[in-house]
């Protein structure tokens, strides 16, 4: 079994605080006690190997913090750790800095020592910049951006290009060369008329808060990783909604989602990682995408996920995405060749996929061991609701798919849970598909969102030797499970029922598998990656 291991190198120290005596009015975060120290960490999921306690801490002590008042050409702060030149505010030392006010064409720069940790509290802040980032982390060990309780904050690049101010290629409304964590109990709106919304050239971590991100390119982008523990995210992006890629280190460039609520409308992929995508919880609604979720490997262990894709819904190792050729995948030119390290594992959660390309597509293996997966599409015979180049095994959970029959594939004979694939006359979309046992008890029912001519059903109730009935639209078929795998697939394998084709009554009955092309068989699906980097 291959195993992809991601090792986390984050060591969090105590935050040293520097300050000045001047405070701006109305900067005290709301608490239930009459103290200037705010309530502490937001912790709902035990993911200590991905998120430190400091990542989740939204509290700060105002009496030990530096306050900065933002006013066009009149910003002020009494600390020597802050320099102000017109509308450029530069933070030069470790500590906590509370910002309030607005700059119509300004920038906040963090230029601290490489060992320094800096917390920036946004307490009703609005910063726009025509030429560069609104917030730029040039140097620090790690920067924490915290939205104060109940506040509305805006950081915006509203120009058509970025003008270089140093050797770094700044291309986002929030741009960081260091590890960057965002958290809080307020709202942050990020707009990038050109370039990306939020970029970290190290790890990008978000643990709480509400975010509204609109960007011409990627919404959230981390070079080493994007890790999200919780929070609310509305992302409208010209390219990927969430993007992670490290061209220099193939073990980095991963996305880890442990919770949160997401609405993503992406011009390219909804979620894209050059290495692994792991989703353990959260509510994710990808309302528009080219490919919904894409990575070299994908682990789905929980959550409620809905994907609408104009190409593949869930894709391991690239597929037909022309943009993926530069994203670090190793697929090569042979679309039927397995890719080393490519897999999709579904062990939990509820997943709904509506795809115009392949529904679930892996250039390696597919393993389903739990959860509920429902696939609608594709409608063209050049794709299938299930597509793989290695092996596909189902051992648990619910899997229901409807789509075209031209390239249809069933799970293979290594499966330990019963699975049925049948080809039928084309049926209209929005028709109900039901599976009944021999006592006419309904085991599964769902509605296909698109027209279809092939159905795959697997549930824990399907047992070898039993007879089941599938009803849908104008078709009805009784299936006797002579083996655990019933129905042909496009690999040329004819599992179950002595090579029975699996056509429904009234189906096309071509007497042959839908494609003669043999795809090489890969090894068994790899183990899930560890939750550390």
Image (spheres, rainbow, N blue to C red):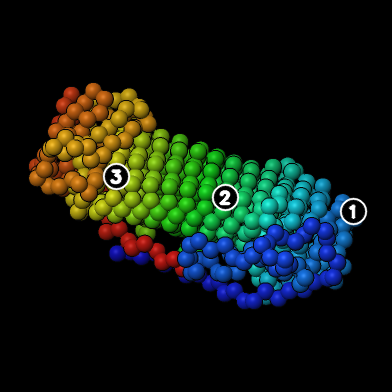
Instruction: Identify the mark at residue 399; answer none if there is no mark.
Output: 3
Q: Is residue 506 above or below residue 191?
A: above
Q: 454 left or right of 192?
A: left
Q: Position of residue 180 (x, y in %)?
A: 63, 62
Q: Nearer the viewer, residue 337 or 207?
A: 207
| Residue sitting at x 53%, y 63% | 43
Mark pair 3, 2: CA separation: 29 Å
Disc 3 vs disc 1: Cβ atoms closer than 8 Å? no
User: Residue 278 lies in what quarter of the image?
Assistant: bottom left
Q: Nearer the viewer, mark 1 or mark 2?
A: 2
Binning the other alpha carbons within 10 Å of mark 1 as few (below 14), some (14 to 19) or many (20 upward) gives: some
Q: Is residue 104 above or below residue 167?
A: above
Q: Position of residue 185 (x, y in %)?
A: 64, 56
Which residue is label 1 attached to? Answer: 73
Query: Which residue lies at the image location 31% right of the left edge and 47% below the top edge?
Result: 388
Label 2, on which residue?
232
In the image, farthest residue toward the right: 74
Where is residue 375? Give x, y as percent: 35, 39
Labelled disc at residue 268: none
Q: Residues within 10 Å of mark 3 (few under 14, many from 20)?
A: many
In which image quadrant can residue 28 be found? bottom right
Which residue is located at x 83 percent, y 64 percent? 23
In front here: 137 or 124?
Answer: 124
């Amino acid at each position: 079994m291959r195993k992809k291991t991601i090792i986390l190198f984050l060591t969090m120290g105590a935050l040293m605080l520097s300050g000045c005596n001047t405070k701006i009015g109305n900067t005290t975060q709301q608490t239930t006690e009459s103290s200037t120290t705010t309530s502490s960490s937001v912790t709902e999921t035990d993911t200590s190997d991905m998120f430190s306690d400091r990542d989740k801490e939204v509290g700060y002590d105002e009496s030990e913090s530096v306050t900065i008042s933002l006013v066009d050409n009149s910003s002020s702060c009494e600390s020597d750790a802050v320099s102000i030149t017109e509308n450029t505010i530069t933070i030069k030392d470790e500590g906590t800095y509370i910002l309030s006010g607005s700059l119509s064409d300004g920038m906040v720069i963090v230029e601290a020592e490489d060992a320094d940790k800096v917390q920036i509290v946004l307490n009703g802040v609005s910063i726009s910049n025509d030429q560069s980032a609104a917030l730029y982390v040039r140097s620090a060990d790690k920067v924490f951006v915290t939205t104060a309780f109940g506040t509305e904050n805006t950081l915006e690049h509203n120009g058509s290009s970025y003008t270089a101010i140093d050797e770094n290629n700044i291309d986002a409304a929030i741009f960081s060369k260091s590890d960057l964590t965002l958290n809080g109990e307020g709202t942050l709106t990020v707009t990038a008329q050109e370039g990306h919304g939020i970029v970290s050239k190290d790890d990008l971590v978000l643990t709480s808060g509400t975010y509204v991100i609109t960007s011409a390119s990627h919404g959230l982008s981390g070079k080493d990783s994007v890790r999200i523990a919780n929070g609310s995210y509305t992302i409208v992006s010209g390219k990927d909604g969430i993007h992670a890629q490290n061209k220099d280190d193939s073990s980095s460039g991963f996305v880890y989602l442990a919770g949160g609520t997401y609405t993503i409308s992406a011009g390219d992929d909804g979620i894209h990682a050059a290495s692994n995508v792991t989703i353990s919880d959260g509510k994710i609604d990808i309302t528009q995408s080219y490919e919904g979720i894409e990575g070299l490997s994908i682990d789905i262990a929980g959550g409620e996920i809905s994907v609408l894709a104009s190409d593949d819904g869930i894709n391991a190792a690239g597929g037909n995405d022309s943009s993926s050729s530069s994203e670090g995948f190793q697929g090569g030119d042979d679309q039927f060749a397995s890719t080393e390290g490519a897999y999709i594992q579904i062990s939990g959660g509820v997943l709904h996929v509506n795809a115009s390309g392949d529904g679930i597509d892996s250039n390696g293996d597919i393993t389903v061991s739990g959860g509920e997966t429902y696939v609608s599409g594709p409608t063209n015979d050049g794709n299938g609701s299930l597509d793989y180049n290695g092996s596909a095994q189902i051992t648990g959970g619910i899997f229901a798919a409807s789509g075209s029959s031209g390239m249809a594939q069933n799970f293979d004979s290594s499966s330990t849970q019963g699975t049925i694939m049948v080809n039928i006359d084309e049926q209209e979309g929005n028709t109900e598909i039901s599976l009944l046992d021999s006592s006419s008890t309904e085991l599964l029912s769902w509605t296909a969102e698109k027209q279809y001519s092939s159905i795959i059903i697997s549930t824990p109730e399907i047992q070898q030797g039993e007879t089941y009935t599938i009803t849908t639209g104008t078709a009805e078929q009784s299936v006797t499970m002579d083996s655990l795998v019933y129905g042909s697939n496009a690999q040329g394998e004819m599992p179950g029922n002595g090579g029975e084709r699996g056509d429904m009554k009234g189906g096309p009955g071509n007497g042959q598998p839908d494609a003669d092309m043999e795809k090489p068989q890969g090894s068994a699906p790899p183990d899930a990656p560890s939750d550390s980097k």
